[in-house]
């Protein structure tokens, strides 16, 4: 649909929305829905959340669950909300530092061109939104807390509100906006691993009560996690609010995030059982070709099908590679540049109706120049011989049958699972090599997303029922271009010299010198494509309160139409580079009901749905064409859809001092497109499920003690797999952690001489996590992160000063928040800030 048609459609919706407002001035004798003068006046709901009602860690209201400000205690859904004070106390720098405290949320990051701001929510991966805007999987991929005022996590399928998103839920971070009262805050932080950071927050009314401006900025020298690492981050975030009239206001907001890492802290290398011949070739052959897996696709095959990718030889981290060592060259680089501009127009149409129009534009660019690899290839014991300065395949190994070699490799893999340090097995009396191929690569991805959104909300009362209807229209389009160039790993297009990471091996070799990598001439264009998607939607939501506001209903539906088109610029000769266009539509209903047994105790139940576009728009079957087996596109794939069911209890005792949410849920996702290998590739459908229990509690019974607790037990798994993929049935997603638990507490000293002093402490518990989809037996061990803070707040003349000392990962636990992400060692951070 063209933009002009959208504008015309919006005009029609506006006319319909204004009709009830004009009806309130109807002639005498007509039935009115306005509140009588003797009754308590209805408050017109806001499109923005008012944080003045927050008390410490207690967030009173939420904007993310219904797109208007609503009390969290009265929402029949699971919502986590983290206040500005909580974010500051835990010393959060990135969005994940905050959302990890939400029940059922852990890292879903894979880093490579994908950023680190993506999360596993109830077992499903999802990227975040800001101020209600979802900017595709390429938008908010790195998020710093410098511009964040609050973070909210909406649980369960929520396409009614946010369109095409995963069913676990979504993270919506709310940025800082201009305020009427002037202030300036300056912050400095420094600590372990050569870290330092400066922040600036200036709020000034340019024209009193009319034009308000706020400017946030930050500069950071990041942690040096690996040898030689240099990471520099810059954040700039100006925002202006202009009250054009008593009933009309505008807000513009610009966010710029830039990060330059050289070299980046690439993931620690994981082990893989390799074929001895390929290891010898990687060390000695011209071009230094990559080593091959011994076990991948050789086991667990169903009759009649080819490889399903299962690889029990994909194992944990190589234990003898130093935790601070880098697998990259000194000149390797990752560069991130993210820009977002948004504008809002708020209009009060009448005493009972309000409208908002939004525009959002996002531009993202990520480039990585890399020479390293992620896998360390390990030979089975006694499969190699070292003589005359070089490795060769042992005659005893060459004499084995193929099946005997596979059995020996599988036995070694099982040994490494139980005892990773047994990798030091010798090769016929010589310490074993551990090789890593180094293929040079330059990859970048560009993304542009633009969105338009219009909404009208009302607040009316009729026959004792309070109704808050909201209707809206939405349009977005996103284009993403990906380009990857690398070498082929042969004599004509060589990789760099293979490293042997075992320091006791006679061929041990590591060279991170820049000069070793400057002669590369990248020859093979591996990826060059452009993906375009667009969505148009109309939606309506109703919040209603019955029986003296004891019975609450929130529900609605969203009609969404989506299109996509992919262009492959390196398509096979004679093939059309422009893929078949894809178009689909889906209506996503959602309803939640709550009943207050007591004013501060509510039972609730909800049903919700969501969808995403399928990974491949057309299903394929394997057919015989001109006498040859061929993968032929058949029917258009349906949207990947999900249904979620949730029941729970919410408490809000002692005026919110004891608030909690306990929920039980079940989510089922259908129409997951999956590649099936049967001589050649076909496409079939799979399903997944997630079910579990979650608890979040915020306790502040006494004024100087605040306590936050959360925990979850969630089973997420593949519930149906196509023929040939039985190996993956009932497996959890790689990023999913079944058991999570979090505690954070703050205590303020209120009596002299300790008045102004406060302390905080907490722990994040992460149960075991699957590390590789292709090896269902490989799990990372559980870990606990103990954190603490001590702070002192005081006044210096007219300025408020705060000094804090944060200790993070106090026990120096060795962990990774996700399989492709490095964890942080023990560190201390000293911060000082002043507000005047």
Image: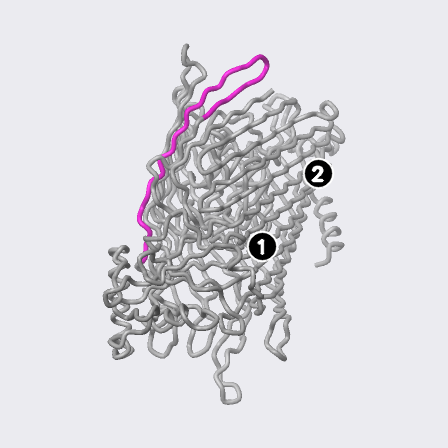
- Which of the two labelled residues, at mark 1 and mark 2, occupies the earlier sequence position? 2
Check if residue 378 falls in the magenta segment: no
* SS label for mark 1: strand
Q: Quadrant of residue 771?
A: bottom left
The answer to whether 367 is drawn above or below residue 411 in the figure is above
Q: Is residue 419 left or right of residue 679?
A: left
The quarter in which the C terminus is drawn is: top right
Which segment is the magenta one?
A: 778-804
Front position in the image: 388 or 385: 388
* Residue under the point 48% across and 76% down: 621
Is 108 drawn above or below residue 388 in the view shown? Answer: above
The tag on residue 367 is 1
Residue drawn at (64%, 33%) of the image: 33
Magenta-span inclusion, residue 781: yes
Q: Which residue is mark 2?
A: 345
How many C-alpha atoms fall within 10 Å of the one at disc 2: few (<14), some, or many (≥20)? some
Badge number at residue 634: none
Where residue 220 sits: x, y (%)? 55, 37
Image coordinates for residue 612, horizontal then vertical, percent: 53, 57
- Residues packed near mark 1 inside 10 Å, few (<14), some (14 to 19) or many (20 plus): many
Q: Residue 450 appears at what percent x and percent y?
A: 67, 51
The alpha-carbon separation of the residues under discs 1 and 2 comes to 35 Å
**Residue in front for this viewpoint, 300 or 805:** 805
Residue nearest the viewer, comparing 325 with 410: 325
**What is the x, y in percent for residue 423?**
28, 59
Pick out the residue farthest to the top: 752
């Amino acid at each position: 649909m063209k933009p002009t048609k959208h504008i015309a459609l919006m005009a029609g919706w506006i006319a319909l929305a204004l009709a009830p407002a004009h009806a309130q001035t109807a002639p005498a004798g007509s039935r009115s829905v306005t509140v009588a003068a003797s009754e308590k006046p209805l408050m017109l709901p806001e499109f923005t959340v008012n944080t003045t009602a927050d008390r410490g860690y207690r967030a009173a209201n939420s904007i993310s669950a219904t797109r208007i400000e609503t009390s969290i205690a009265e929402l029949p859904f699971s919502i986590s909300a983290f206040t500005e004070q909580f974010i500051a106390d835990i010393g959060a720098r990135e969005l994940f530092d905050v959302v990890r405290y939400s029940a059922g949320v852990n890292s879903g990051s894979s880093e490579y061109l994908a950023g680190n701001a993506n999360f596993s929510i109830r077992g499903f991966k999802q990227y975040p939104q800001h101020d209600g805007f979802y900017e595709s999987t390429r938008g908010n991929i790195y998020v710093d807390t410098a511009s964040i005022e609050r973070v909210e996590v909406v649980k369960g399928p929520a396409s009614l509100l946010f369109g095409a998103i995963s069913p676990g839920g979504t993270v919506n971070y709310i940025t800082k906006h201009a305020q009427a009262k002037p202030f300036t805050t300056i912050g400095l932080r420094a600590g372990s691993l050569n870290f330092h950071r400066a922040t600036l927050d200036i709020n000034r009314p340019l024209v009193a009560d009319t034009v308000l401006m706020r400017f946030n900025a930050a500069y950071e020298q990041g942690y040096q996690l690996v040898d030689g690492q240099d990471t520099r981050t810059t954040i700039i975030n100006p925002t202006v609010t202009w009250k054009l009239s008593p009933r009309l206001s505008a807000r513009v907001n610009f966010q710029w995030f830039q990060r330059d890492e050289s070299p980046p802290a690439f993931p620690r290398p994981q082990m893989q059982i390799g074929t001895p011949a390929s290891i010898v070739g990687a060390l000695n052959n011209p071009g230094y070709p990559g080593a091959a897996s011994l076990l991948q696709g050789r086991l667990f095959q169903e009759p009649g099908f080819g490889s399903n990718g299962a690889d029990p030889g994909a194992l944990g981290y190589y234990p003898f590679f130093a935790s601070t060592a880098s697998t990259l060259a000194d000149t390797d680089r990752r560069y991130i540049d993210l820009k977002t501009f948004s504008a809002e127009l708020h209009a009060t149409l009448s005493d009972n109706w309000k409208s908002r129009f939004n525009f959002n534009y996002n531009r993202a660019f990520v480039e990585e120049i890399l020479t390293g690899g992620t896998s360390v290839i390990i030979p089975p014991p006694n499969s190699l011989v070292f003589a005359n300065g070089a490795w060769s395949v042992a005659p005893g190994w060459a004499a084995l049958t193929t099946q005997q070699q596979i059995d020996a490799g599988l036995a070694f893999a099982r040994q490494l699972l139980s005892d990773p340090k047994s990798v030091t097995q010798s090769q016929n009396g010589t310490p074993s090599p551990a090789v890593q191929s180094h293929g040079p690569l330059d990859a970048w991805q560009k993304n542009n997303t633009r969105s338009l959104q219009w909404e009208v909300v009302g607040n009316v009362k009729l026959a004792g029922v309070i109704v808050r209807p909201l209707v809206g229209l939405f349009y977005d389009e996103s284009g993403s271009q990906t380009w990857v160039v690398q070498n082929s790993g042969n004599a004509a297009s060589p990789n760099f010299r293979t490293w042997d990471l075992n320091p006791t091996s006679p061929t041990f070799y590591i060279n991170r010198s820049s000069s070793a990598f400057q002669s590369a001439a990248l020859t093979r264009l591996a990826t060059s494509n452009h993906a375009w998607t667009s969505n148009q939607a109309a939606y309506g939501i109703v919040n209603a309160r019955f029986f003296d506001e004891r019975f609450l209903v929130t529900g609605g539906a969203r009609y969404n139409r989506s299109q996509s088109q992919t262009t492959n610029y390196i398509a096979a000769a004679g093939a059309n580079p422009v893929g078949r266009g894809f178009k689909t539509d889906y209506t996503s209903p959602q309803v939640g009901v709550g009943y207050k047994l007591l004013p501060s105790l509510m039972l609730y139940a909800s049903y919700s749905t969501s969808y995403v576009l399928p990974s491949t728009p057309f299903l394929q079957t394997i057919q015989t064409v001109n006498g040859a087996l061929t993968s032929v596109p058949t029917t258009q794939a349906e949207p990947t859809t999900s249904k979620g069911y949730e029941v729970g209890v919410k408490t809000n005792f002692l005026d919110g001092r004891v608030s909690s949410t306990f929920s039980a849920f079940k989510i089922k996702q259908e129409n997951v497109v999956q590649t099936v290998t049967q001589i050649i590739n076909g496409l079939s459908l799979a399903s997944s499920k997630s079910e579990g229990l979650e608890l979040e509690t915020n306790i502040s019974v006494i004024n100087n003690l605040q306590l936050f607790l959360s925990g979850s037990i969630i089973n997420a798994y593949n519930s149906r797999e196509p023929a040939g993929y039985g190996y993956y049935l009932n497996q959890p997603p790689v990023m999913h952690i079944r058991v999570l638990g979090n505690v954070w507490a703050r205590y303020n000293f209120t009596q002299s001489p300790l008045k102004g002093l406060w302390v905080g402490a907490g722990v994040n518990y992460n149960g075991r996590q699957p590390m590789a989809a292709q090896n269902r037996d490989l799990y990372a061990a559980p870990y606990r992160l103990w954190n603490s803070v001590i702070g002192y707040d005081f006044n210096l003349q007219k300025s408020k000063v705060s000094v804090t000392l944060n200790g993070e990962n106090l026990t120096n636990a060795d962990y990774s928040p996700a399989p492709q992400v490095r964890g942080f060692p023990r560190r201390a951070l000293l911060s000082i800030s002043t507000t005047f």
